[in-house]
Image (cartoon, rainbow, N blue to C red):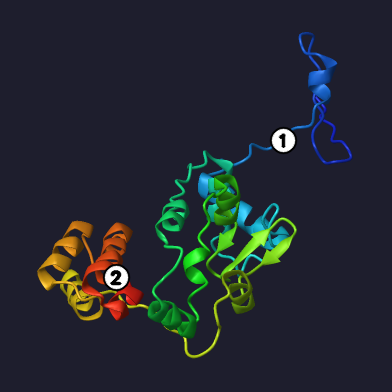
Amino acid sequence: MAMVRTRGSDGRIKHNRGRGESRRHQEEPEHDELPPVHEEQVEEQVEQQAVQEGWPGGPIDTSLLTRYEHGLKRAEGDKIELRIASLGKKLADRIPDHHPEVIQGWLNISGLCWLERTSLKLTDPQLISAFVERWHPETSSFHMSFGEMTITLDDVACLLHLPVRGQFYTPVSVSQEQAAKLAAELLGEEYEFALRETVAQRGGYFSQQWLYESYMRNVNFYWKYDCAARA
């Protein structure tokens, strides 16, 4: 008896179904084994898809906000609770109701008189956290769900009542010794006394309590109004 093998329209050889095999199993098409997929390939596919479709809930063009992906991953995981340090209430309690006339005159001329009374006594940690999470250093702006926001010089002038004029000033970092020397020159403090404070602060800084005490000494004991105004 000769065995004849026939081919179907797809070119494959047809097999007879055995007794123990179900019809459903016989009718299933044959599939070739898929190659293993590595994690690197998956990440590359996700990045390519993001380039084509944009980040979920974010910009379509991913070439500008290059750090948006890291913020997105951080938002999906466990959020770090931010610690909001606000000294507004303490500052408001320390500001005297009236300055000596000469000090108040200098403050008015400088245009900074409004700044000492603009500190917030209460802060909203949830609101601040939301703004921090949506801040993008690439554009120096906030990318909110309703659009993009940025802080302009007009906002600074309107909210803080500060004059926006002249050249930009960028503070430079100073050492502990340099900060103590500046305190002796501008605030009338002893160099060694100021140096002990910068050493305690571990840098060229002074605590607000130290500056407040310097102001009170210059006003009430030494009558150095120029040093008090700087403090």
Looking at the image, residue 7 sits to the left or right of residue 191; the answer is right
Q: Tell me where residue 111 appears, x and y as whole percent.
A: 50, 81
Looking at the rendered structure, the kind of residue marked 2 is Val
Asked if residue 116 lies left or right of residue 36, the reply is: left
* 205 to the left or right of 18: left
Residue placed under numbered mark 2 in the picture: 219
Kindly identify which numbered label has been placed on residue 146. Answer: none
Viewer-proximal residue among 101 and 174: 101
Quadrant of the rendered structure where residue 32 is?
top right
CA gap between label 2 and label 1 equals 90 Å
State the quadrant of the N terminus: top right
Residue 33 visible in the displayed image: yes
What secondary structure is found at the residue carrying circle 2?
Answer: helix
Q: Residue 31 carries which label?
A: 1
Q: In which quarter of the image is the C terminus?
A: bottom left
Q: Nearer the viewer, residue 57 or 86?
A: 86
Which residue is found at the position 81% from the left and 14% from the top? 22
| Number of marks in picture | 2
63 lies left or right of 181: right
Q: Of residues 48 and 209, which is closer to you in this image?
A: 209
